[in-house]
Amino acid sequence: MIVSRSSFAGQGKYSARTLGDNESNYNYMAYSVTGVMLSNIMGQPMAGADICGYRGDASMELCARWYTVGAFYPFSRNHNSLEATAQEPYMWADTIIPHYIVKYTGLDIIKWAMDTKMSLIRYYYT
């Protein structure tokens, strides 16, 4: 699979496109939604963002929310810089999200998001 940050006319037929290095904050999560949609409109069907952000330290709540949004991107990956703290899903296994009546861990929400993404893959390929 070829993944590129730059693109050209017709590239969507042969490769995926990532939006590039983004920050670990809520504004960049919001920007990624419009960035993916614009890429889709421009002929890049497999476009996505670095979920949880690339630069900076992501909180567990930000990462869980970004995984939920990323479940609906055609292409998404968890990718960050060497200077940032680890943000793999298993890092959030014991962390409880305090905002919900039912207590979920970050890993519970990420698992739900990944299951949702896997259930939608058949639609991306048709």
Image (cartoon, grey):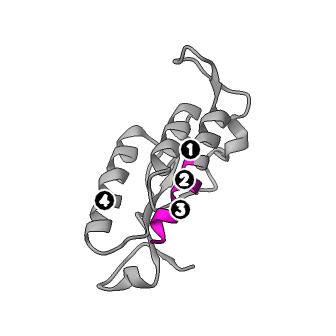
Report which quarter residue 85 is drawn in: top right
Marks 1 and 3, the one that precedes in the sequence = 1
State left or right for residue 23 relative to residue 60: left
The residue to which callout 1 is attached is 113
Quadrant containing the C terminus in the rendered view? bottom left
Residue at x 55% of width, y 48% of height: 116
Distance from label 3 to label 2 (Cα)? 6 Å
Q: Amino acid at mark 3?
A: Ile
The reply to whether dot 3 and dot 2 touch (C-beta < 8 Å) is: yes
Q: Please identify the dominant SS of the magenta region.
A: helix
Marks 3 and 4, the one that precedes in the sequence = 4
Residue 120 pos. (x, y %) = 51, 56
Marks 2 and 4, the one that precedes in the sequence = 4
Q: Amino acid at mark 4?
A: Met
* Magenta extent: 116-126
Is residue 52 placed above or below 109 in the rendered structure?
A: below
Distance from label 2 to label 4 (Cα)? 17 Å
Between marks 1 and 3 in the image, the one whose residue lies nearer the viewer: 3
Q: Amino acid at mark 2?
A: Lys
